[in-house]
Image (cartoon, rainbow, N blue to C red):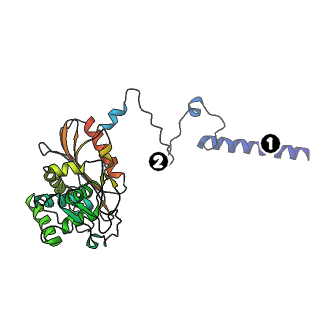
Amino acid sequence: MRRITITLVCLLLSSTAFALSVDDAVGTAPLKQTYTERNHRPSYSSRERVRPVYRRPKHETRQSQQVGKLRLASASALVIDQTNGAMLYGKNIGARQPIASITKLMTAMVVLDGHQALDEKISVTEDDVDHIKFSTSRLTVGSVLTRFEMLQLALMSSENRAASALGRSYPGGIEAFVEAMNNKAKAIGMDDSTFADASGLDQRNMSTASDLARMVGAAYGYDVIRQVSTTASYIVETDNYRPTQYRNSNALISNKDWDIGLSKTGFIREAGHCLVMQAQISTRNLIIILLDGQGKMTRVGDANRIKKWLENTQFKSNQIS
């Protein structure tokens, strides 16, 4: 009996050793590893591979990162050298879209072209109240200001009732004023633009970045527009109310790092956040158009990105994205 038991144990041990030797041969359960096998780096699939942490080389500077392709968040953008007309950057420059209160630049040009007395007093009436977007205003019905002050508030603070009052007080009323706006647009080559009101609240005020560059260039020729659109703040006194201070809707006007010669902001839901400017950057006179930004600070952020890009890049060709 003892012999049979010993024989069975020996048979079991030999079969186990054979099984282990087979597993070693196919490599599924190695008993020993060489130095090379222990230090071999396993390969991973693309999903398993971990991204390495990027560390800036010592010789690379932050300034060098500004050089290269400019990326802006605004849906449409255009940067033009005002001196020679060269396009330095373009993005969806032919896209026709609502332009909101950028419209007020055309309003100002038509008012000034009409040679109406700037010291003439104009009153705000119920007709100037916004029944399209139901926007609020600190100019109450019955407020009386001069035409110059209405221009000041319309361009500097984008005051809608002031813009409406300017159009309404034009010879022939608002219909004649809108007709004059569209005629002015054609005269300066804005072939893809149409205007429907004086304030820009109507979404039918449509244009392109390319056309708006023409409008900014034309508006820059008016001393009054340059002056009032770049004023940081202004106090008005109506006949019935205490003095009220208004501020420029473009925060960059108060930024000492910017040299801005003309400015206008705009916003309605259909147009997004917009900004057009004439500015000098690195001794270059430029026209900057930014349209349809998603957030209120998008246009400011894009403008600052353009400024850094221009200050750190030597242009050899135009960039179109």
Residue furthest right in the image: 1
Q: How many marks?
A: 2
Name the one closer to the observer, 166 or 198. Answer: 166
Could you tell me which residue is drawn at 33 percent across and 48 percent down? 251
Q: Which quadrant of the figure has residue 54?
A: top left
Q: Is residue 13 above or below residue 149?
A: above
Determine if residue 175 is in view: yes
Classify residue 286 as left or right of residue 65: left
Residue assigned mark 1: 10
Q: Which quadrant of the figure has residue 202?
A: bottom left
Residue 62 pos. (x, y %) = 37, 33
Q: Secondary structure at mark 2?
A: loop
Name the one closer to the observer, 112 or 20. Answer: 112
Residue type beneath disc 1: Cys
Residue type beneath disc 2: Ser
Residue furthest top in the image: 59
Label pair 2/1, CB-CB below 8 angstroms = no
Residue 209: which numbered mark, if any? none
Residue 46: which numbered mark, if any? 2
Residue 19 pos. (x, y %) = 68, 45
Classify residue 181 as left or right of residue 230: left
Name the one closer to the observer, 309 or 135. Answer: 135
Q: Secondary structure at mark 1?
A: helix
Q: Tell me which label, 2 or 1, sits earlier in the chain.
A: 1
Few, some or many residues within 10 Å of mark 2 (<14, 14–19, 20+): few
Q: Is residue 171 above or below residue 259?
A: below
Determine if residue 205 is in view: no
Q: Which quadrant of the figure has residue 99?
A: bottom left
Classify residue 75 as left or right of residue 46: left
Residue 260 pos. (x, y %) = 24, 44
Few, some or many residues within 10 Å of mark 1 (<14, 14–19, 20+): few
